[in-house]
Image: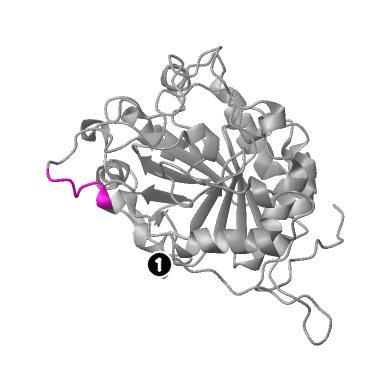
Amino acid sequence: MNAIAEPLIAAGPSSDGLPRIAAPAFDRLGRPLRDLRLSVIDQCNFRCTYCMPRHVFGADYPFLRASERLSFDQMVKLARAFASLGVEKIRITGGEPLLRRGLEALIERLARLTAASGKPMDIAMTTNGSLLASRARALRDAGLGRVTVSLDAVDQGVFRRMSDVDLPVTRILDGIEQAQAVGLAPVKVNAVIQRDVNDSQILPLVRLFRNTGVAVRFIEYMDVGGAFDWSNATVLTAREIQAIVESEFPLVPLPAEREGATAVKYRHASGSGEVGFISSISAPFCGACSRARVSADGQLYTCLFATQGTDLNPWLGDAVPVEQLAESIRASWNARDDRYSELRWMPRKPATGKVWPTVRMSLIGG
């Protein structure tokens, strides 16, 4: 990997001639901007029933054309602007990010960035794992630090029903193994659990990854864009999931790594390994959310459950200074007061389904 650093943006030269870093951004609730979820493509090779059901995302669905997606140059410009405002971690998302050609070249450029704190930028990726085995080493060599693999079942039949693709689950497991082998660390597995759909997979997932160094995180089924059939009845809460895990594997709580972490983490009382629970439905954590999302077509979303975004494309041209892009982002973040998951239960009549339409999940990533 090329070790030459990409420069951060400056609000103007300092007295010593070095770039002057812009001040961190805070929203109306005092939440800092620390994390960027950068979607590189809105397409996916899976048709998971809770995200991209095939009856909606069929062969004729109008996904973004290549010309409509942000270029790597534009993404790097975005990353520099976000870094100047306090972002310390960039997570590459999709769709399925490994469908974007030449992704390693983007990761290499992003990995050269330095956060405003002076720390190297933390570069991570979320993937369905289907293409990971053959790409893991190149991704690691490019500068990817960590990877999270979405895997909702280890039983082939359940996996097939949820992903709606004819793909052996062993291919995902091979990708996880290769990611570990090349030094991507930590490797995490995210499993979205739906009541009476894949709740039978909770214990098999824990059994499989216990003592392997792979952390397993269980996520409550959320009413995000794509979850057209979501209802309260389909949600298995984090507390219920944890009870199932602890019926076989006693757990010991771990301290939170940092403010704004989404998962409540535990370690096995006997043996090694980590299990986490993300309770965005039953116990929302909006108050500490520090994540911004930029879609593959250049829209800034300040909440996973947003209904609309802010178009950043006018500031992404070569003629526009990065400082102006950063100030546009800052203005959007300063106006942010999103807390959808907390407001979800506030209508006069409790909702059993989605409260309001949200942006397409495959466009902005998780």
Q: Is residue 320 visible?
A: yes
In front: 209, or 188?
A: 188
Relative image position of residue 353 (x, y in whole percent): 24, 32
Image vertical order of residue 308 relative to residue 110, above or below: above
User: Secondary structure beneath disc 1?
Assistant: loop
Image vertical order of residue 6 relative to residue 107, above or below: below
Image vertical order of residue 28 relative to residue 186, above or below: below
In front: 107, or 137?
A: 107
268 lies left or right of 36: left
Residue sitting at x 59%, y 67%: 86
Q: Which residues are magenta?
A: 343-348
Is residue 269 magenta-colored? Answer: no
190 lies left or right of 327: left
Is residue 346 magenta-colored? Answer: yes
Our reading of the magenta stretch's main secondary structure is loop
In front: 198, or 83?
A: 83
Task: Determine which quarter of the picture holds residue 255.
Answer: bottom left
Say which residue label 1 marks.
28
